[in-house]
Amino acid sequence: MDHFLYRDGRLFAEDVPVHEIAVAVGTPFYLYSTATLVRHFRLFDEALSWGPHLVCYAMKAASNQAILKTLAAEGAGMDVVSGGEYARARAAGVPGERIVFSGVGKTAEEIRAALEGGLRQFNVESEPELRVISQVATSLGVTAPITVRVNPDVDAKTHAKIATGKSENKFGIPIARARDVYAEAARLPGIKVVGIDVHIGSQLTQLEPFELAYTRVAELTEALRADGHEITRLDLGGGLGIPYARSNEAPPLPTDYGALIRRTVGHLGCEIEIEPGRLIVGNAGLLVSRVIYVKQGEGRDFLILDGAMNDLIRPAMYEAHHDIVPVIEPAPGQELAPYDIVGPVCESGDTFAKGRPMPPLAAGDLVAFRSAGAYGAVMASEYNTRPLVPEVLVRGDQFSVIRKRPTFDDMINRDTIPEWL
Ligand code: LLP
């Protein structure tokens, strides 16, 4: 459920009419709802309330500090995957002990910064990384808490580009080799094993793959304990999917997911961490855009928007579906006509939808892409020298620009010209 609803024929974000924000901010822009963010966070938090736990928001999904602060105030931890994300989480006021650091390519500099600033744990993805963490920790005279991310070889049944738990993927250590890696971790100076980590993919719409993976993690926990390791924490990753189309069957709810976690690993007495990103922020965000032209093509009509693939890459990159709705509610029974919905960028891949049934729209009309909060603004680029889309946060009847649209000068002046030119 989200807080973007029609009222009196107009789309609202909580208590603010979307068109009013469009007039104030200009289009396109990302628009987030605080109430939806908080609601989704609490669903996870409550789903795990049967035991000690920490919901570490995967901030790669949407990393604006206003979003991080909103979630941190609810008690969220953060899952970070780069030195930049670590610094951003700290800048937003997230304490180090609530930050887990994931990712296959952590550099020695990133490891050092996190150890100096404080963190909850590194989720280690390879033996070479483990050795670098040991060296850096030893040189700083500190101990690095770690889990090893295991790859359970489970088919997440999601888009190939976002499946991470099969043995052919670059992520984690094959679960069959895990005991050897934990043995090495226990021998290395500056390393303290605290648990196990797993993450099998994103936009999972079924619970079975989680069930398989977590069952394997439970078995591994027993085996590692028998080997003498102290396993007190299980980081079970993120990945729970969201409904992208209103017409689709809804994926499992956080409550079902929490119950599954309890069933598979609850008996181990571990503290549970999860790293949801998409489900927290996906349906808490819209991309609002304006129709520039309605163009008649050969046997098809195009809606040309001022938003483009550089602003929301998901349709071009993953063939993702986003519902696109008019900001003025169509009258009941209004006839729909098929449109190809495209942006102004100079490639055919800049297509959001083909033959999408839409009510009649005209130049100047506003539309909103639903479910655009996750992996939207963060994956935007300035391709075609298009300014990064601003972000706006609504809370009740107030809204605030949480990232400004850069000016052309801001963009252009980032280049530096060699003196020989
Ligand atoms: N933890 C780890 C280690 C991850 O790699 C990810 C996502 C998450 C947590 C959060 O997963 P979520 O709950 O959001 O599914 N750009 C793609 C999604 C990439 C996901 C990458 N990893 C998209 O737009 O669909």
Image: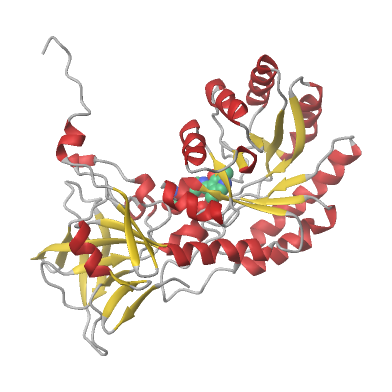
Q: Is 291 drawn above or below residue 15 in the view shown? A: above
Give the position of the C terminus as an image quadrant.
top left
> Which of the pair 328/320 is nearer the observer?
328
Measured as percent of width and height from the top left, residue 336 is found at 22, 80
Front residue of 246/165: it is: 246
Residue at the spot 27% in from the left edge and 69% down from the top edge: 18
Seen at 81% across and 45% down, the residue is: 221
Whether residue 298 is visible, yes or no, is yes
Q: Is residue 331 above or below residue 396?
A: below
Is 311 situated left or right of 40 in this image?
A: left
Question: Residue 107 location in percent, x, y?
Answer: 54, 24
Q: Position of residue 298 (x, y in %)?
A: 10, 65
Camera-side residue of 390 and 82: 390
Q: Residue at x 53, y 21 (%)?
A: 109
Indicate the quadrant where residue 101 lies. Answer: top right
- Quarter of the rendering containing residue 418: top left
Up/down of 330 relative to 252, above or below: below
Q: Residue furthest bottom?
A: 333
Tag count: 0
**Does residue 160 appear anywhere in the picture?**
no
